[in-house]
Amino acid sequence: MSSIAAAIMGFAGGMVGGLLGVGGGVLFVPALAIFMGETQVRAEATSLLAIVPVAMVAVWRQLGYGNVRVRDGLVIGALSPIGVAIGVITSNTIPQRALELTFAGLALLIAAQLVIRSIREPKTPPPDYSD
């Protein structure tokens, strides 16, 4: 991977992470696989490392706005390593194509749910942080 491409991907991932709360799975994995020619497993593994600083800065900034549900985040974070361990073993034993299709299917499912939710829910104004 070239340093310039990695820098661009890092900046873009940080921007998308801060704006939408995503980055690793949604941006880094496809970018590494499609544009950088990495296998799905290597893209996923690299993304897991890249998301650490993105998440740290995002949480720090969002804490200042009062948007972080600390207890929920800690519970999710405490239980995640078990799932990650199983997921890593599985990702290294199933075919590359199955991983790609599973990732694509999950991305489509999430996109569909977001569209449905945005259509059904009433529009609310953004919070006022002027205090």
Image: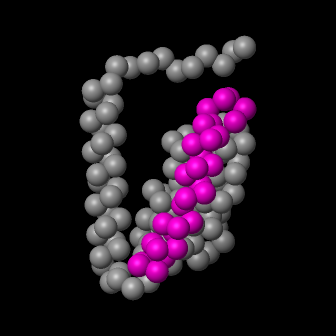
Looking at the picture, tell me which residue is in the foreground, 68 or 27.
Answer: 68
Residue visible at 34% across and 40% down in the picture: 114
Confirm whether residue 26 shows in the render.
yes
Looking at the picture, tell me which residue is in the foreground, 32 or 118.
Answer: 118
Q: How many marks?
A: 0
Residue visible at 30% across and 42% down in the picture: 113
Q: With 61 as the anchor, is 33 left or right in this view?
A: left
Q: With 101 as the anchor, is 123 left or right in this view?
A: right
Measured from the top left, where is residue 78 in percent x and y?
A: 60, 57
Above-or-below relation of 97 to 108:
below
Residue visible at 42% across and 78% down in the picture: 91
Q: Identify the image quadrant of the N terminus.
A: bottom right
Q: Write down the quadrant of residue 94 in the picture.
A: bottom left
* Magenta-colored span: 63-91
Measured from the top left, where is residue 18 in percent x and y?
A: 60, 43
Is residue 58 inside the magenta stretch?
A: no
Confirm whether residue 12 shows in the render.
no
Above-or-below relation of 40 to 111:
below
Looking at the picture, tell me which residue is in the foreground, 6 or 94.
Answer: 94
Measured from the top left, where is residue 66 in percent x and y?
A: 66, 29
Is residue 81 inside the magenta stretch?
A: yes
Residue visible at 31% across and 33% down in the picture: 117
Label the magenta part by its dominant secondary structure: helix
Q: Work out which residue is located at the far top of the displayed protein and give it.
A: 131
Above-or-below relation of 3 to 14:
below
Measured from the top left, where is residue 71 in percent x and y?
A: 62, 41
Q: Write down the quadrant of residue 46 in the picture.
A: bottom right
Q: Write down the quadrant of residue 59 in the picture.
A: top right
Q: Identify the image quadrant of the C terminus.
A: top right
